[in-house]
Image (tube, rainbow, N blue to C red):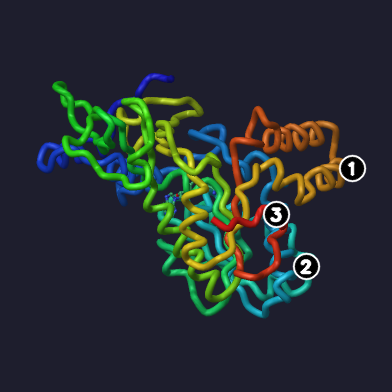
């Protein structure tokens, strides 16, 4: 862990909130730390890249956005070249993924003409960066998914967005679940503590788990999956959700983490100044999306998805026209995206698609979920 970097402007407000109202949930702490309109982490900075706090797949290699673009265009072809679609990205960061996706799909007849481009982004700083990256494209920004136009099928991608949405944590204590809260210690610093009252979590109540076991629930993520699925069930389309996460049905273990300048830091010390995230429980997302009536596929590993979308072939094509140093960079990027000891296995991709429709590009028929 690198040294914490001081409390920052949000800390004083959070401290006052806790003094006045008592300890707050981890979800509320995360929500304010990430998305406070003035002092939230994303409100005032571009956190991506070598000079920032973390690096994402589209920033590592152009092949990521290119292959996602190809997958969305293929899905559009598979659904019969719909005359109009809403092409959207949630949490687009610098806009790199979509820029690469649009460049790669220029040659797909009719695809760009059918697509109106919509970005869901809360950060004014990142909106500006996205505008520059996507110069030459007609882009509309929204603050929330529900603002996306509903008059055409939705083709959407979200990479490393879900991990930033707030989670609730529960800790096993004397055979019952108590919510983990953020309170104040004797020196006025933030500390974890348990809610006095137990929470009856129905499905997990019988589990034989030791004291101290941690369970994470993410109502905000499930609500998002449900909202996207309901739209896609009604109108058709595709949502590709990519994030680091786990397959098992129960999200056990404390995965809350804070990152600054590419290193892990204490999640409580500097709210608003560090990136807070946690692992995504894809099984919970799948259940929410199925419940809303959509088809669900995966999750599959990022390595499997990119492999099936043809990353090796694309690397070969690009390498042929590259200088030796460009070739080295291309190969190292692909390795980082796909190697099991890099992002290949930790990152997972899940698709929400038209019920009864074709299997989305990058997924296999047997990866369609029924629960
Ligand atoms: N997808 C990009 C950026 C990932 S960083 C990439 O892969 O590089 C997370 C992104 O989600 C940022 O653009 C951030 O501003 C945005 N974001 C975080 N919380 C959000 C929320 N609640 N609604 C919409 N966007 C959000």
Q: Nearer the viewer, mark 1 or mark 2?
A: 2
Which comes sooner in the sequence, label 3 or label 2?
Answer: 2
Can you say whether 358 is above or below 59 in the image? Answer: below
State left or right for residue 174 relative to residue 277: left
Task: Tell me, for residue 366, which label it has, or none.
Answer: 3
Can you say whether 301 is above or below 270 in the image? Answer: below
Look at 73% across and 33% down and name the residue there. Answer: 335
Give the residue at mark 2.
108
Mark 3 beta carbon near ligand 1 (under 8 Å)? no
Give the residue at mark 1.
320
* Disc 3, SS: helix
Q: How crowded is the residue under tag 2: few (<14 C-alpha within 10 Å), some, or many (20+)?
A: few
Front in this rendered view, residue 6 or 181: 181
Look at 18% across and 37% down and name the residue there. Answer: 23
State left or right for residue 149 relative to residue 24: right
Report the Cα–Cα distance between label 1 and label 2: 22 Å
* Disc 1, SS: helix
Cβ–Cβ under 8 Å for marks 1 and 2: no
Report the Cα–Cα distance between label 3 and label 1: 35 Å
Whether residue 84 is visible, yes or no, is yes
Q: Nearer the viewer, mark 3 or mark 1?
A: 3
Give x and y (percent) for residue 273: 36, 35
Splitting the image into 4 quarters, where does residue 102 fall? bottom right
* Disc 2, SS: loop
């Amino acid at each position: 862990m690198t040294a914490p970097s001081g409390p920052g402007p949000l800390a004083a407000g959070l401290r006052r909130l806790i003094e006045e109202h008592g300890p707050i949930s981890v979800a509320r702490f995360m929500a304010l730390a990430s998305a406070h309109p003035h002092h939230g982490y994303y409100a005032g900075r571009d956190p991506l890249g070598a000079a920032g706090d973390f690096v994402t797949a589209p920033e590592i290699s152009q092949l990521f956005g290119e292959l996602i673009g190809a997958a969305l265009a293929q899905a559009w072809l598979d659904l019969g070249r719909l005359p109009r679609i809403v092409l959207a990205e949630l949490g687009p960061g610098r806009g790199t993924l979509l820029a690469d996706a649009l460049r790669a799909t220029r040659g797909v007849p009719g695809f760009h003409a059918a697509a109106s481009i919509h970005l869901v982004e809360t950060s004014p700083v990142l909106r500006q960066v996205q505008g520059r990256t996507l110069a030459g494209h007609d882009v509309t920004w929204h603050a929330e998914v529900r603002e996306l136009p509903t008059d055409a099928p939705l083709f959407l991608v979200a990479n490393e967005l879900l991990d930033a949405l707030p989670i609730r944590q529960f800790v096993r204590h004397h055979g019952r679940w108590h919510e983990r809260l953020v309170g104040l210690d004797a020196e006025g610093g933030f500390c974890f503590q348990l809610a006095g009252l137990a929470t009856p979590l129905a499905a997990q109540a019988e589990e034989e788990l030791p004291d101290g076991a941690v369970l994470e629930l993410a109502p905000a993520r499930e609500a998002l999956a449900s909202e996207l699925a309901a739209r896609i069930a009604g109108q058709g389309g595709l949502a590709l959700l990519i994030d680091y996460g786990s397959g098992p049905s129960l999200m056990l273990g404390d995965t809350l983490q804070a990152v600054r300048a590419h290193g892990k830091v204490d999640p409580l010390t500097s709210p608003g100044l560090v990136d807070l995230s946690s692992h995504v429980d894809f099984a919970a997302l799948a259940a929410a999306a199925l419940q809303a009536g959509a088809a669900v596929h995966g999750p599959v590993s990022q390595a499997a998805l990119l492999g099936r979308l043809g990353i090796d072939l694309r690397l070969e094509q690009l390498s042929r026209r590259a200088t030796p140093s460009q070739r080295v960079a291309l190969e190292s990027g692909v390795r980082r995206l796909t190697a099991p000891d890099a992002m290949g296995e930790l990152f997972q991709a899940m698709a929400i698609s038209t019920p009864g429709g074709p299997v989305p590009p990058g997924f296999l028929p047997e990866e369609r979920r029924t629960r």
